[in-house]
Image (tube, rainbow, N blue to C red):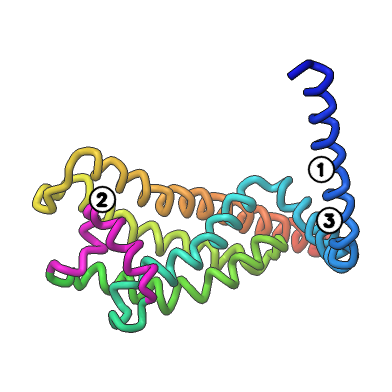
């Protein structure tokens, strides 16, 4: 095949691709007109939080924590028949890879850990929705309950980290222990960041209020 013949074939393919793109663009035009304003609105709402890195981290933390909690963390509380097959298989694969002692349904119940799971189901999960919205919108009313949540969850994750790190009775391989520590530790350190940030914000707000009251008394 000559070079000119090859270029002609390339041109034919490119022209065909351009025609297909034009048809697809025309077909999608009505949908784009409907979706475009919502995309622009979402982008404008996202811009402020992108300038608040701690809130952005907390927003991702709470937003991703909702499906993880519902579909994975709370499986030890659900009756077996209610868990979809896909999530049972996902749990089985996870256990085969990492042998997580807190997710193992074949060993006796750890009542202290089950109490943590109940707290996650009935206290933390409802708060995730509340916190996701409050952090996204930078609401001042979210900071105090956020500090309470962060302090609470840190005290539930720390015993889990200690068990994984120091309890040798679970028969974990070194790579399993290290991966589990990497998976669990963000749920300690991100709340730690949230706790410090919330305390700083609350303290600054109280200082500002005290200063305003002091100014009023001087008048």
Q: Which of 147 and 41 is in front in this view?
A: 41
Q: Name the residue under label 1.
A: 17
Q: Nearer the viewer, residue 47 or 208?
A: 47
The first of marks 2 and 3 along the sequence is: 3
Element at label 2: helix
**In this rendering, which labeled residue sits more in front, label 2 or label 3?**
3
Q: Position of residue 132 (x, y in %)?
A: 61, 65
Question: Is residue 219 positioned above or below 182 on the image?
Answer: below
Q: Are the residues flagged by discs 2 and 1 in contact, CB closer than 8 Å?
A: no
Q: Mark 3 points at which residue?
A: 24
Q: Which residue is drawn at 13% across and 67% down?
A: 107
Q: Residues within 10 Å of mark 2 (few under 14, many from 20)?
A: some
Q: Residue at x 45, y 71 (%)?
A: 124
Q: Residues within 10 Å of mark 3 (few under 14, many from 20)?
A: few
- Furthest residue in direction front, as rendered: 1
Numbered range of the magenta stretch: 84-107
**In this rendering, which labeled residue sits more in front, label 1 or label 3?**
1
Q: Residues within 10 Å of mark 1 (few under 14, many from 20)?
A: few
Question: Is residue 85 positioned above or below 189 on the image?
Answer: below
């Amino acid at each position: 095949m000559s070079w000119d013949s090859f270029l002609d074939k390339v041109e034919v393919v490119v022209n065909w691709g351009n025609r297909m793109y034009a048809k697809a663009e025309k077909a999608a035009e009505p949908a784009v007109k409907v979706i475009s304003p919502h995309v622009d609105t979402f982008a404008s709402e996202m811009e402020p939080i992108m300038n608040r890195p701690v809130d952005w981290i907390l927003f991702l933390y709470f937003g991703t924590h909702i499906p993880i909690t519902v579909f994975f963390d709370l499986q030890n509380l659900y009756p077996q028949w209610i868990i979809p097959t896909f999530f049972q298989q996902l749990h089985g694969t996870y256990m085969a890879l990492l042998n997580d002692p807190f997710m193992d349904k074949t060993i006796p119940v750890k009542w202290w850990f089950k109490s943590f799971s109940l707290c996650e189901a009935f206290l933390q999960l409802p708060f995730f929705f509340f916190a996701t919205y409050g952090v996204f919108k930078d609401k001042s009313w979210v900071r105090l309950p956020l500090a309470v949540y962060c302090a609470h969850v840190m005290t539930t994750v720390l015993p889990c980290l200690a068990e994984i790190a120091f309890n040798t009775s679970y028969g974990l391989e070194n790579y399993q222990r290290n991966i589990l520590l990497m998976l669990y530790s963000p749920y300690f350190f991100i709340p730690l960041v949230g706790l410090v940030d919330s305390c700083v914000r609350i303290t600054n707000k109280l200082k500002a209020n005290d200063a305003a009251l002091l100014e009023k008394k001087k008048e």
